[in-house]
Amino acid sequence: MTARNGCTNSRQGFVPPWVAALVSLLLTLFVCPPLVAQKVDRDELVNIAVEAYLYAYPAVLMEITRQLGTNCESPVVEKLCAPMNQFVHAATFPDATFTDVVRPNADTLYSSLWFDVAEEPLVIQVPDSGGRYYLLPMLDLWTDVFASPGKRTTGTAAQTFAIVGPSWDGELPQDMGMIRSPTAVGWMIGRTQTNGPADFASVNRFQAGLKAVPLSSWGRAYTPPKGEVNAGISATPPVDQVAEMDAAAFFTRFAQLTKHNPPHANDYPVLARMKRIGLEAGVPFDFDKASPQLQQALRKAVPMAQKWIAAGITTAANQVNNWSMVMPPIGTYGTAYLRRAEIAYAGLGANVVRDAIYPFAAMDADGQPFDSSKKYVLHFRKDQIPPVRAFWSLTMYNDKQFFADNPLNRYALGDRDELKYGADGSLTLYIQRDSPGKDRESNWLPAPESGDFSMNLRLYWPEIDALSGSWKPPKVKPVE
């Protein structure tokens, strides 16, 4: 016998109707009382609306990025675009014209695959990398990394696994691994270690061995279907598109996304908060039918939340020698929704810290913002050189978070470059707009032609010294 609100009487056997009715009533009133709508004052409306924006931001940004990254009939290497459930592989490093993803890197070659496993699993075949470092992190629609096959986790031998949806219940072929995605839609953004342009051909051969096939076509000849091109999809960087969305467009899109992409199990507190103002996961939201008070609160929340997100990447981090050390949570966030939104804004597709950490700098040793008209040096003592099991790099970004055009087409320097070290094992990098001289150009990271800039250190498979905080990157010093 089941009472209202899902309460259940576990007693079995015949129960007189009048007894059943009475028990049902008592259960409803005293055990499972009906939810009563609560009045939410104006300030609380805004507070909940801000929380909702922060919670929803990564999913909306992922969706806009997905639309742009899949808006093609067949894989387009130059734009790193491919139809759903198909790989596209970067054949070379991106350059200063690449604006689809903020803060790209120039020390691995990307392999991108947007997947939709709502209908059936997607089988992924990975070749033997011959010991080469690679990783295939998978992000759900909330940007949490739920799996990361690669050298650190699964080794470098050939492997085959299936990505299955959150509610899929079936059988896979023997010896095929299973990875369950928390959401129907997600993004695999693989990275393969690439030791400069001379290494492109070798990496491309490994990438060619990465295959994606629907389970229903596994073991048979398979030709991927053509994708659909929507001329209305904007080429504007996704971060900018989301920033320009008004409250109606943003929250309506969020509600649409949650229909097939469920929240995480630990999201119930924030979901309950949002439900109080009429935002419910999986339920369509009509902004025009919302009360004037709610409409006003949602409109007010957008710039407030955006300000928090944009500022958070520096204020939320530990400052070490004027480097922002953004340590956990990264890649998996639990209920740290502001941090999740900050990382999505500053570097969508970030790995978990065991795979990589990204010290970030936007100011010099004196606390002044980097200025491309000035000169700087970054000097590592021998014991300060980034401790890694894979590799490290220093990457330059302009004031739009993209690569800065320069005469050398050089956007990063790292341990795989032909750097010149001091006799004592130290390393000095020169960061400036103009050449520091031919004898120093091997250690030169060009700055943009104008404006502010920022930099990221990338430590792939960092050693425990880097993860524990005992290693500290040196200050970037201005040169008079």
Image (cartoon, rainbow, N blue to C red):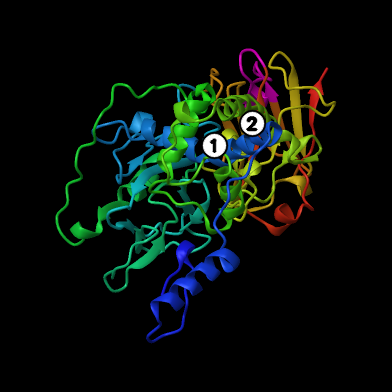
Task: Name, please, the residue furthest toward the front.
Answer: 18
Is the residue marked by circle 2 packed among few (<14), some (14-19), or many (20+) residues within 10 Å? many
Tell me which label, 2 or 1, sits earlier in the chain: 1
Is the residue marked by circle 1 packed among few (<14), some (14-19), or many (20+) residues within 10 Å? many
Q: Position of residue 302 (x, y in %)?
A: 59, 27
Read off the magenta span: 431-451
Q: Secondary structure at mark 1?
A: helix
Q: Is residue 213 left or right of residue 345?
A: left
Q: Which residue is mark 1?
A: 57
Where residue 218 sits, quadrant-wise, is bottom left
Q: Is residue 314 left or right of residue 116?
A: right
Quadrant location of the C terminus? top right
33 above or below 331? below
Q: Secondary structure at mark 2?
A: helix
Q: Disc 2 to disc 1, how far (Cα)?
A: 9 Å
Where residue 252 sits, quadrant-wise, is top left
- The residue lying toward the viewer, choosing from 126 and 121, is 121
Q: Position of residue 188 (x, y in %)?
A: 42, 48
Q: Position of residue 137 (x, y in %)?
A: 47, 51
Q: Which residue is mark 2?
A: 305
Q: Amino acid at mark 2?
A: Ala
Q: Are marks 2 and 1 in contact (CB under 8 Å)?
A: yes
Verify whether residue 442 appears in magenta: yes
